[in-house]
Amino acid sequence: MTLRAATEADIPAMFSLLRQYESTSLFPLARLSEAGLGGDGPHALCAWVAEEDAAISGVVGLSAAGMLLPQWPGAAWSELRPALAGHKVSGAVGPAEQVRPMLAALGLASSPARHNGDEAGFVLELADLVEPTDESILIRPDHGHRPLMTEWRAAYLTEIFATPPAEAARQAEPDVDRWLAADSHRILQAEGQPVAMSGFNARLPDVVQIGGVYTPPALRGRGHARAVVARHLSEVRSKGVRRAALFAVSPAAVRAYRAIGFREKGRMSLVLFESLQRIRA
């Protein structure tokens, strides 16, 4: 087995491997699709590939924001540390059975983290989507919705990831600007009022990954989260998307997603360090 830095020539084989494990590989798949290898911006990606008998058997991505994105079944994790020595990482997201031994091998398993959890993964064939029957409507947000979306995004970051409020407010603004530019998010309106938000944090022509679903606390327990996700998926199904994936943070979220047809598949780990961690040789 050889572990080496990936090149542009490796991208087709990387796609082929990642597609075999699609539901847990949508972050690296989407990043490769958007920007290839290298480039600028928070979604830019560099990667290392494991090669056996001239075939790629594993991929470990590192985003410009410092997130490790592994998809290396049967990995020899001890080989990764020398390759990544000197790089700074902000966290990791991927299959739980890979993220945990990977962080241990990199000497990062006990690094202070503001979020460190394993969450249930879910998948849905959109032909099986259970659509809402209420009278809510889906809105494509524009710049006029930016203040509300920024407020909701900051609240989400603080609630889910324990991001300090001031930092969450700073992060929310560029997040929302990217969403508006990418047309990735939708707002649910009920009785003339915005009540929930849904988005895609990874997208390919035939599959999407749901992320950042938010309902203000005072409006929870009324089915708004499941309605906004279902209506958003119904919209993209009409444009050729056939599958969806997500991972759920809370029991309430699990119930909501099961209610619209999602079924559980695997577990995902999401780790966000309190500060950048340098990988030592």
Image (cartoon, rainbow, N blue to C red):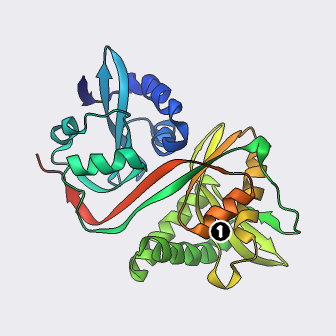
Residue 198 x/y as whole percent = 65, 62
Which residue is drawn at the image coordinates 49% and 25% (left, top)? 16
Q: Is residue 279 left or right of residue 187?
A: left
Q: Is residue 36 visible?
A: yes
Residue 234 x/y as whole percent = 78, 51
Quadrant the C terminus occupies = top left
Amino acid at the residue labelled 1: His
Q: Which of 218 and 119 is in front in this view?
A: 119
Which residue is drawn at the image coordinates 74% and 59% (left, top)? 259
Which residue is drawn at the image coordinates 48% and 65% (left, top)? 174
Q: Residue 142 sits in which quadrant?
A: bottom right
Q: Which of 224 and 98 is in front in this view?
A: 98
Q: Please, is residue 193 above or below residue 275 in the view?
A: below
Q: Is residue 166 left or right of residue 255?
A: left
Q: How many labels does the image show?
A: 1
Residue 107 x/y as whole percent = 18, 53
Q: Is mark 1 on a helix, strand or loop?
A: helix
Q: Which residue lies furthest to the top in this view?
A: 53
Q: Please, is residue 61 above or below residue 184 in the view?
A: above
Which residue is drawn at the image coordinates 32% and 51% (left, top)? 100
Q: In this view, does 229 lie to the left or right of 151?
A: right
Q: Residue furthest left?
A: 281
Q: In this view, does 77 lie to the left or right of 61?
A: left
Q: Is residue 63 visible?
A: no
Give the labeled residue for mark 1. 143
Residue 39 x/y as whole percent = 37, 42
Q: How crowded is mark 1: few (under 14 residues within 10 Å), some or many (20 or more)?
A: few
Q: Which of 7 and 13 is in front in this view?
A: 13
Q: Please, is residue 54 above or below residue 213 in the view?
A: above
